[in-house]
Amino acid sequence: MKLHELSDNEGATKKRMRVGRGPGSGKGKMGGRGIKGQKSRSGVAINGYEGGQMPLYQRLPKRGFNKPNRKSFAVVNLGLIQKFIDAKKLDANKDIDGAALVASGLVRRELDGIRVLAKGDITAKVNLTVAGASKSAIEAVEKAGGSVTVTAPKAAETAE
């Protein structure tokens, strides 16, 4: 068998309909768009329009509230911190703060601060300085002989 002998199964591929290519094609003149009107013109996409019926996004009830000045924290688990210490990407002897976590690659960016959660185990004695930590995470670090300092989260920069 050679490359030029390869072909797809019979009926597996179908040629696309070439619209507006003369009366013999079956889709000539108006190209299946009908006569006049908004939908017959080019560059029109009426998304979410349901022909005058109340659209779905308006029929469904609206719920909740999105706080405009909400803080978003970068989340780190204790197990990951331990893994990075074992891999020598973090130094347990020095204070571990947001800058150290970003430099090690554990966190991509600090956002409004870093929050530590208690998933996983930590055995190294570490001093963490973060914007937030769960109670169980603080207990786990202190049990391993370390300490957690919770600082105030970064203030969101206001545009003037």
Image: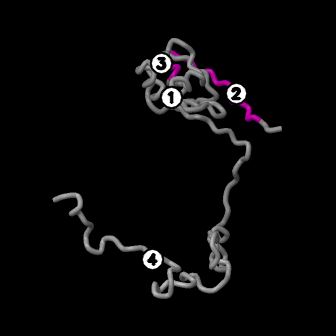
Residue at image x 67%, y 24%? 151
Mark 3: amino acid: Ala
- The Cα atoms of the two marked residues, 1 and 2, are separated by 21 Å
**In the figure, is residue 41 to the left or right of 75?**
right
Mark 1: amino acid: Leu
Whichever of labels 3 and 1 marks the residue nearer the N terminus, that label is: 1
Q: From the viewer's side, name the closer residue of 10 and 58.
A: 10
Residue density around tag 4, few if under 14, some if 14–19, many if 20 or more, within 10 Å? few
Disc 3 element: loop
Whichever of labels 1 and 2 marks the residue nearer the N terminus, that label is: 1
Residue at image x 69%, y 50%? 66
Residue at image x 44%, y 27%? 121
Q: From the viewer's side, name the closer residue of 147 and 105.
A: 105
Q: Which residue is mark 2?
A: 152
Q: Say the numbered circle drawn on residue 17.
A: 4
Mark 4 vs 1: CB contact within 8 A? no
Which quadrant of the structure image shows residue 97?
A: top right
Residue 155 within the magenta-colored segment of the rendering: yes
Q: Position of residue 93 (x, y in %)?
A: 51, 12
> Magenta part of the protein: which range?
141-157
Q: Position of residue 106 (x, y in %)?
A: 51, 29
- The Cα atoms of the two marked residues, 3 and 1, are separated by 21 Å
